[in-house]
Image: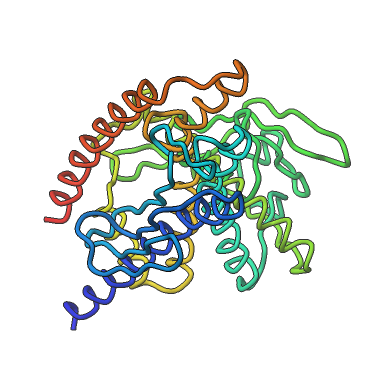
Amino acid sequence: MERDEGLVGIIIAILVFGLIIFIHELGHFLVAKAAGIRVQEFALGMGPTLFHFTKGETKYALRLLPIGGFCQMEGEDSESEDNRAFCNKKVWVRICVVAAGAVMNLILGFIVVLIMVSTSPALGSTTVSQFSEGATTQQTGLQEGDTILKVKGRTMFISNDIVYEMLNDSDGIVDMVVLRDGKKVKLDAVQFQMKEENGQRMIVPDFVVKATPKTFLNVLNYTFRQTASTARLIWVTLIDLVTGRYGLNDLSGPVGVIDAIGQAASIDISALLNIVAFITINVGIFNLLPLPALDGGRLVFLIIEAIRRKPIKPQYEGYVHFAGMILLFLLMIFVTINDILRLF
């Protein structure tokens, strides 16, 4: 029985991962077609082709390995005499085509969050409802009715942001900015009680926040806030990775992602939707990073072209992206090995 559940989880994970990749490549595809660019192949997956068909000028293919996909356009990586080639379109058109994949992932993330928020029994807030008995935060400045705007200088979009900041605090003393009686009030050194768990000292939250009525506008507002919160969490995690707070061993590749999706699917639909939203927003943001071989790297070259009004030679750009692709593959191999080792 457990084996069957594990297999179902893997299948669901592969389908979800495929959907996220499909949406990304579909963004490139739709904008390219709308701009009149010749699309040679639209593929889901990498490696050997399982099956394909051709409609019009485009080959549509499903490939063996569910770890990526691509939308191959005429003149994308080289010069071309074709007037419909990617390289012969205006720079703003090419910017739109390149950015479209990440934008589609962010839109998908927003839609998934909207589904979660719409079906949740209640909406949270960042407004303090009440304190537990003996609360130290109440004694050091925080009051009932305060809307927490910032914790340690960081804007609070939703209640989970407050929880995240608490979990990442080590001394139990935090600075806050709250909205009280229509005015912003700065609270210095708000004191929380601490507890030790798994060898780490953690804050003990001693207040709860108010629920927000579920109206159409509140649901929409909360969806925007939760999407922004997720996007920022990804940026914060990347910064923590660069600054050394997290190491490469903490990264997960396709195997780890599929395993995480499978575990979420075994819990309930809410957990599955939550991780799908996180991953698709993650894919959108990560692809916009100004790194070679990613969409963000291509955008850098296009922006430079727009500024200098002259493209960089395709072969030079190709060298940069090729080097970035090699490094990306090496990183993927490393994290995949780590993922496999963590499974055993």
Among the 4 quarters of the image, the one containing residue 192:
top right
Given residues 105 and 300, the one toward you in this image is 300
On screen, residue 298 versus residue 218, left or right, reads left
Query: Which residue is pictured at 20% across the width and 49% down the height?
Result: 339
Considering the image in quadrants, where does the C terminus appear?
bottom left
Residue 249 point in image, percent of width and height = 23, 37
On screen, residue 18 versus residue 303, left or right, reads left
On screen, residue 225 versus residue 102, left or right, reads right
Query: Which residue is pictured at 24% across the width and 36% down the height?
Result: 331
Examine the rendered structure and indicate whether residue 13 appears above or below residue 158. below
Query: Which residue is pictured at 15% across the width and 45% down the height?
Result: 337
Considering the image in quadrants, where does the N terminus appear?
bottom left
Residue 71 point in image, percent of width and height = 41, 51
Examine the rendered structure and indicate whether residue 242 appears above or below residue 273. above
Given residues 147 and 221, the one toward you in this image is 221
Considering every residue shown, the one lying at the far right of the view is: 182
Considering every residue shown, the one lying at the far front of the view is: 81
